[in-house]
């Protein structure tokens, strides 16, 4: 007798539940779909019925999605979990992945790419129950790529590092394409390998993807490792100058692409020089950025308001944002007419890619 | 019974209280004195003064750096502070943030 897997959809929005119901009915495996509006009800249902997949919202009254997921992870470790959220904040994506969810999708992306979303769900439902362990934070990206290639798998690896997103296309164990920050092919692959940390997820394979990488993956990994070693060991003045020049060009390109006016990188007092890009070296501005970060941190501790995210300011000439990363303060200047909404995300993106 | 009531009252009074985050607005003059505020009167006034002083120092230092600012906002994990410069003083808006605060609560930046 043919068995149909069961999907449990948890969301406090009744209209959204109806939409999910209609959408999942289109899955080729024809799963049985159950919908619930509260975390407590979902947990009670999972105790009584075996489910294959839980699709969960994050923002809900009483018990939010992260609370439900942390309970589910302990009680039903074999259950596949997907987060479907309207919260466009990368922090929630990281927190969800830290809880071991299999997929994180934004509701807007799901509506825009519904077929791809359904492929992902179908792929998750089809995987063997006993296959796969979660939690491989100790492995580098090189290890993950090698594992995928050695197992001759076909998949798309989506790699996220803060606001930066990259994709690697692997077909029958061969790396065929890479895409990152506007670059494609080998250049993108090398750029991704320079990332020191991040999260990754497996998306369904795209066999029709155009091939841009022809070298074997081991050769690429070797070249990349050699390039990194050479950069680290390089002592010749000429190569130091060349590296510095390349870095400057890269940073200016980043600045132009994001539409920022300038970036001033300010180390802690007495620990190195101020780095300026896109404007004249300005000690008063650097001092203000340092003082703003210090003042805000001190104030946050005094009023117990939690960690500092950023300081922003504007006048008629420009908008400015101060972000802190690894003891350094980044002062980023934006034109006055730049849309204020996405400035924080854009600034974070700029800062994340600054030293990569 | 009376003794027990007294004992319990004393016990509960001596417990460390959780400080609520301020919500509302505060107007400070150019010397950092609080002129008027809509924050709950339970919230310690000296902390409101601290917020006012620190915000004014940010405006002052920005002026010293030849970059006078019309508005400054400080974003913490659980509180957003937005301050507008008012002839040397400032009006400060305080927005506490929950984990899932709606985006509409957030100030300009």
Image (tube, rainbow, N blue to C red):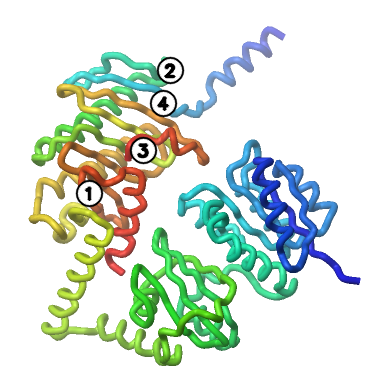
Q: Residue at x 35, y 44 (%)?
A: A341
Return the disc, 1 or 3, that comes first in the chain's sequence: 3
Residue A134 point in image, percent of width and height: 62, 68
Disc assigned to residue B40: 2
Chain bearing mark 4: B
Chain bearing mark 2: B
Give the CA separation, mark 4 to mark 1.
30 Å
Disc assigned to residue B22: 4
Residue A214 point in image, percent of width and height: 42, 90
Is there CB contact under 8 Å for labels 4 and 2? yes
Give the CA separation, mark 4 to mark 3.
14 Å
Which residue was labeled with disc 3?
Answer: A301
Return the disc, 4 or 2, that comes first in the chain's sequence: 4
Q: Are marks 4 and 3 on the same chain?
A: no
Give the CA separation, mark 4 to mark 2.
7 Å
- Point out the frontmost of discs 4 and 1: 1
Could you tell me if residue A153 is visible in this image? yes
Which residue was labeled with disc 1?
Answer: A334
- Point out the frontmost of discs 2 and 3: 2
């Amino acid at each position: 007798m043919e068995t149909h897997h069961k999907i449990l959809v948890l969301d406090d929005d009744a209209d959204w539940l109806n939409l999910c119901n209609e959408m999942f009915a289109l899955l080729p495996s024809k799963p049985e779909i159950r919908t619930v509006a509260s975390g407590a009800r979902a947990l009670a249902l999972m105790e009584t019925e075996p489910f294959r997949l839980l699709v969960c919202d994050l923002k809900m009254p009483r018990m939010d999605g992260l609370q439900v997921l942390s309970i589910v992870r302990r009680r039903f470790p074999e259950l596949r979990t997907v987060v479907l959220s309207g919260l466009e904040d990368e922090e929630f994506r990281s927190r969800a992945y830290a809880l071991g969810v299999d997929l994180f999708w934004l509701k807007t992306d799901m509506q825009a790419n519904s077929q791809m979303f359904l492929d992902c769900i179908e792929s998750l439902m089809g995987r063997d129950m006993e296959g796969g362990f979660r939690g491989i934070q100790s492995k580098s990206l090189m290890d993950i790529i090698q594992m995928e290639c050695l197992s001759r798998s076909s998949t798309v690896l989506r790699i996220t590092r803060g606001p930066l997103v990259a994709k690697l296309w692997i077909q029958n164990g061969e790396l065929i394409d890479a895409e990152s920050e506007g670059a494609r092919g080998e250049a993108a692959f090398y750029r991704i390998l320079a990332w020191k940390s991040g999260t990754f997820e497996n998306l369904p394979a795209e066999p029709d993807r155009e091939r841009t990488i022809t070298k074997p993956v081991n050769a690429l990994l070797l070249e990349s490792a050699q390039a990194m070693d050479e950069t680290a060991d390089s002592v010749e003045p000429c190569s130091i100058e060349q590296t510095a020049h390349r870095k400057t060009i890269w940073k200016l390109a980043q600045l132009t692409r994001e539409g920022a006016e300038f970036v001033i990188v300010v180390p802690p007092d007495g620990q190195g020089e101020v780095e300026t890009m896109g404007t004249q070296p300005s000690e008063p501005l650097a001092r203000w950025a340092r003082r703003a970060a210090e003042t805000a941190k001190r104030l946050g501790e005094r009023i117990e308001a939690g960690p500092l995210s950023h300081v922003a300011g504007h006048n008629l000439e420009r908008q400015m944002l101060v972000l802190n990363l690894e003891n350094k303060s980044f002062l980023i200047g934006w034109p006055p007419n730049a849309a204020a909404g996405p400035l924080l995300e854009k600034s974070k993106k700029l800062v994340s890619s600054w030293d990569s | 019974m009376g003794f027990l009531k007294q004992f319990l009252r004393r016990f509960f009074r001596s417990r460390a209280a959780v400080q609520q985050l301020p919500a509302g607005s505060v107007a400070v003059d150019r010397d950092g004195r609080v002129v008027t505020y809509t924050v709950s009167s339970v919230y310690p006034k000296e902390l409101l003064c601290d917020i006012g002083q620190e915000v004014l120092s940010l405006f002052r230092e920005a002026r010293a750096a030849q970059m006078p600012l019309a508005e400054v906002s400080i974003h913490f994990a659980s509180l957003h502070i937005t301050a507008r410069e008012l002839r040397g003083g400032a009006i400060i808006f305080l927005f506490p943030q929950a984990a899932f605060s709606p985006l509409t609560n957030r100030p300009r930046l």
